[in-house]
Amino acid sequence: MGTLETRAIISLLIIALGSILTRAPFMMTSVAPSKQWADGPLALITTPQFQTKKTDIFTSGATHMALLHNSIFRGYNSIYHQAPLVADQDKADFVGYCLTWFKFVKSHHDDEEATLFPKVEELLKDKTIFEETHKEHESFLAGLAEFEKYLTGLKAHSDFSGDELLRIMNSFQQPFEQHFHSEIATISRFADHPNAPKQGTPENDAAAATFKAWGKSTVTKAGVTDVVPFFLLNLDRTVEDGTWANWPPMPAPIRWGLINLAGAWHSRWWRFASCDAAGQPQQLWAYRVANAKA
Ligand SMILES: [Fe+2]
């Protein structure tokens, strides 16, 4: 390849990188919340590890599940508060944000049923441990499906109605909240199951590895350019005295890349997220737009 061609390719790469970086979430200005934030109406979960200081594999597995559920909860809450306020010019992006939340929840649910729960049943040699959880899953699936159907069925994004979305969300909010809380208690209780592996045994190590591997793969396989930025931009790094500031554990440049490079793809959707690129709670975007108009 000639020198001119090499230079042209390098220039193109620099231009492409520049255009990605100008769209990256870290370029967005962030304002600290002064109004209702994404910590309600769904009540966020206190992690079992923070509450009990226990460190067995089930307390730790339930804790990581709680952190994941809280990202889903902040996502729900951020949608709930912004849906009635979203400006016409932002409706297409808001629908993209809402559908990513749906994809996150649906893949989380499907991956638990298909992968995690059978593995834990096998580990504890007990097929009954998730009976309640299966029933709870059933209780909100219809409402969740309606949420997606409404958003994908819009003929034009301008037809989006915040009131209609809230009506659908209210129809499954209670069982949804109840389930995401009770699943944490269920997993924590497995520490007292008669077949729970004892600390320091190979079975215990294998079980710990199962939780870890599942946690690692479940979000990335759901979607690197949508579910991953959604998940990371709804993780509040300040909670529980900053205990989880670096959760999930990964090298800082990888975290940065997942938020800012993968996140540049649909960057306008992430303005609605509850936290900024540094994982700090931020004022919800729709309030900022409404304030600027007032
Ligand atoms: Fe879960």
Image (cartoon, grey):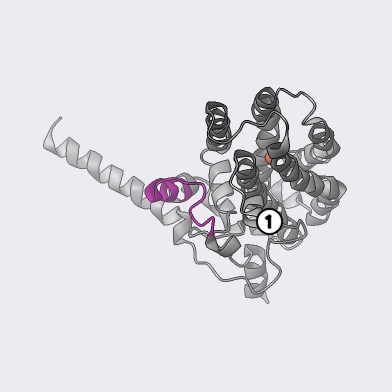
Image position, residue 176 (x, y; %): 80, 45
Which span of residues is magenta-colored?
243-259
Instruction: Locate residue 226: give its quadrant.
Output: top right
> In the image, is the residue at mark 1 within 8 Å of ligand 1 by its beta carbon?
no
For the question of whether residue 247 can be seen, the reply is yes
Q: Which residue is mark 1?
A: 46
Q: Residue visible at 64% across and 44% down?
A: 59
Amino acid, disc 1: Thr
Residue in front for this viewpoint, 196 or 290: 196
Q: Residue visible at 82% across and 30% down?
A: 131
Residue in front for this viewpoint, 180 or 105: 180
Say which quadrant the C terminus sits in.
bottom right
Image position, residue 237 (x, y; %): 54, 59
Instruction: Locate residue 135: give its quadrant.
Output: top right
Residue in front for this viewpoint, 245 or 106: 245
Image position, residue 34 (x, y; %): 65, 74
Image position, residue 8 (x, y; %): 22, 41
Q: Is residue 236 left or right of residue 250?
A: right
Circle 1 SS class: loop
122 in relation to 17, above or below:
above
